[in-house]
Amino acid sequence: MLIRTLAAFLLCSASAHAQTEIQWWHSMGGALGERVNELAGKFNASQKDYKVVPVYKGQYPESMTAAIAAFRAGNAPHILQVFEVGTATMMAAKGAVVPVAKVMADAKEPFDPKAYLPTVSGYYTDLKGNMLSFPFNSSTALFYTNDDVLKKAGITAPKTWKEVQAAADKLKASGQQCVYTTAWPSWVHIENFSAWHNVPIGTKQNGMGGFDTQFTINSPLHVRHVAMLGEMAKKGQFTYAGRTNQGDAKFSSGECPLFTGSASAQAGIRKAAKFQWSAHFLPYHDDVKGAPQNSIIGGASLWVMGGKKPVDYKGVAKFFAYLSQPEVQMEFHTSTGYVPITLAAYQMTRKTGYYERNPGAETTIKQLTNKAPTENSKGLRFGNFVQGREVIEEEMESVFAGRKEAKAALDDAVKRGNEILRKFEATARN
Amino acid sequence: MEKRVVFRSAWLPYALLAPQIAITVVFFFVPAGQAAWYSFQLQDAFGLRSEFVGLQNFEALFASPQYLQSFRTTAVFSVLVAGCGIALALLLATMADRVLRGALAYRTLLIWPYAVAPAVAGVLWAFLFAPSIGIVTYFLRRFGVDWNWIINGDQAMLLIVIASVWKQISYNFLFFLAGLQSIPRSLIEAAAIDGAGPARRFWTIVFPLLSPTTFFLLVVNIVYAFFDTFGVIDATTQGGPATDTQILVYKVYYDGVKAADLGGSSAQSVILMFIVVVLTALQFRFVEKKVQY
Amino acid sequence: MVENRPGLNLLAHAVLIAGVLLVAFPIYVTFVASTLTLDQIMTVPMPLVPGDQLLANYSQVLKAGTTGGSQASVAQMLLNSTVMALAIALGKIAISIIASFAIVYFRFPLRNFFFWMIFVTLMLPVEVRIIPTFKVVSDLGMLNSYVGLTLPLIASATATFLFRQFFLTVPEELAEAARIDGAGPMRFFLDVLLPLSKTSIAALFVIQFIYGWNQYLWPLLVTGDESMYTVVIGIKRMITGGDAANEWHLIMATAMLALLPPAAVVVLMQKWFVKGLVETEK
């Protein structure tokens, strides 16, 4: 005990009494940013060797650009929060990033990949089972209903897309201007849609098996689904709101009674909605074998940047160990709506009766773990997928605006998407 | 034009020029050179690996229907912005030239959109035209127009044209007013004595005499539509829906920053540089003509 | 006016008033929105008379931005914009006037070469070389600083050109008289040229202040820290979600704060501004 204290004292004085600072760049604004600051603050208070400094760097694309520029200039942060579509880009940047598994092993921190929810960790793990980045805020897509409006029109919450269309007809007839809207169109209607129906988004296990993957989102099922959305748009039953979470507001203001969006929208809906609402599983096509399978996550993970001193990485490892503690996870999960990343945290939350008091909160986890994931539903990994997603959304928008047929649009999305994948492959191969 | 009386000094002119040249080299020529260099490379986002690929980035651009489409979008957008901006400003200037009373007041009230940033103009008009809560949207709906610029590309284009033109009217107005006021009264009086009415006088005398100003403004407005409207677009449509409002300069930014495609973005920058050189050369050729006019 | 046509005069006034209203309408709606609560704005249609939240909204944004999205204080942003606009305006004028003086009033080797070097930059607006310029600034460690915000924008050729045009119209006799009096070039510059250039300088100040204040793309790239946002960027960053989730009353208050200083500069210095814009650009 005395020796340990002495050693610690010597170490401290060796580093000139300064704590090791760990820079953490993130994109959580507003209330979420306060949660981030709380996490860092509590960690800093729990020990004296390391100080995590969170810095809000703007939204995900901007903070990623800033981090890349900083890395090129030699002063990248230690931890960078990167959204899920940036995973392949980060993964291919060998030398710029250090896999989390390695960071934890080098620091001799206890780390058991099996303790994490498989659908969550699977997204950020390579084929050999090494976790590359630390899952931080994960959500999935849910289906929200304005129960007051549904009750008045005499409809029960739809479970299949056929039921959604029937409900839409009824709601439109009863005078609703807007019936259904969505957020994150590609994430909901292509990516999650494919996983939920156990069909591939791309070859090679949705890109996890190699950079030579190709998109497969122009299958007859995909075409049929997007065409259905186009039809609904034409009939005024589907009001397009934009590529990000612009649809959230249309639901919580009461304008549109049916809505598909991220689970993380619940915080905002809870605050703003002046009506009864509930969250459900995504609708599915009941004539597809295997549906519903399980949905995939969205959100972001924490990547560790390369080129830092070993003592810094020890601090990062300690911070990640702290974040994995069930109490910390439970606190974060219940206050934000994001999914708890470990099974232990999930059980702990269950025991407190939280899900009885807040039914919508468990829907997320239940949907993610509906069935054991197949190779079509572990997640996806496409290079330059920021561009890829925008291409898919551009083509979907032409369908919703009535300018293109679904088949032509999805064929073009595949063609243009594959060009982007090939370009990424070329840069990643050298 | 040269000065007859000049000073001579071995070092003073260099010292005076030094700050400007230094900044010009560091922040203009070095980046421009780098843009040209990157345009021949294929790089990953982090710059860890790069490969010389010659003209491949340029070939890919010209083979991409989206890039060619953005040429068309930019052309349509600039013609609309320049055309409407000039026509409206000319109308207002002509009217202001007629009225003696209150001319100064009108001028004061009409020039201050010049002070508004294009991005702020975009935000203001997007607010007015917001699909759910916009006040103009509300009136349009009353007249049966279903307004949703988030999905309707033509409406999105209309929105950014309106915001851009609104901002530019004052600039054009000032130039036209000055131009009108420099037309000799004697010419107009002579025509009036000959029996020409105001409309005829305008089209046969005033408008031709204004042509240097009109041409000058045409070039300035087109350059404005090409570049300064970036703020309008980024604050409102961000190039959407489905690339309907993605003008060339926005694509350069998007590909370079959001998509981390440095090679493609730099190639687009190089192409844009050529276009700007042509436009500026045109403008200067013409300004010389005007001086002799 | 040549003949008296009351009908046409009436039409002229009508058109002008319509123009003024069209120009003023968005600003008026913005102002009204900045004095309402969010709920009032969200109920369609929005009221068109000012509300009572003026003090509440403006003090909120000045202190701590919006409550949901960006929480940077607008007061800080206004400070950043002011520093940026002043630095660019004054810096540009200072550098360009001496560079122009050198080009016009001296003969020295490479004079034409430097002249064309500056001329060429007219053809390279910042948007065209935006990514590499960002990289240069990043390599120099100037990101997120006032220096990084202003320095790259200080050396454009327009001011140099304007001064050159002006200097060419200055009578030769003045320089000759200075030479005869034995005054050196800097004496000539400070005692004769500078006072003569007052109007051009004033005009350029207005134009460059507005240019600096309204910069968008460059500050967007160069600032990541909230404490360095300019007010124009700050507005964009307050718009987080769809058009119902934004705190429009606060965003509109910020928009008013963003456009009042440059508008004040334009209106107060109108005389010089118009003169400078129209006459020196020709």
Image (tube, coloured by chain):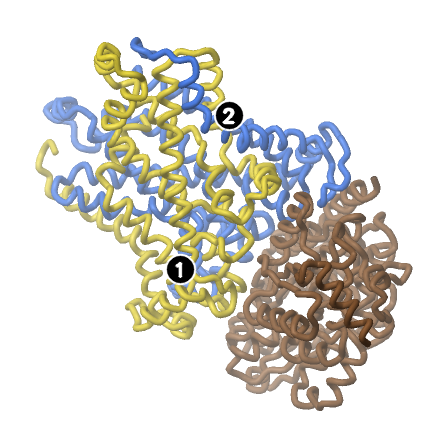
Q: Residue A401: where, in percent of width, then height?
A: 59, 56
Chain letter, disc 1 residue: C
Q: Residue B13: where, in percent of width, then height?
A: 41, 18
Q: Residue at x 69, y 65 (%)?
A: A50
**Residue matched to label 2:** B277
Q: Residue at x 41, y 75 (%)?
A: C39
Q: Is residue A404 above or below residue A174?
A: above
| Chain displayed in blue | B
**Is residue A188 in view from this perspective?**
no
| Chain displayed in yellow | C
Q: Is residue A388 above or below residue A125?
A: above
Q: Residue B185: where, in percent of width, then height?
A: 14, 26
**Residue matched to label 1:** C75
Q: Give the camera-side residue of B243 and C165.
A: C165
Q: Residue at x 69, y 54 (%)?
A: A389
Q: What numbered label is drawn on residue B65?
A: none
Query: Which hue belongs to chain A?
Result: brown
Give a yes or no on whether discs 1 and 2 share a subunit.
no
**Is residue A167 in view from this perspective?**
yes
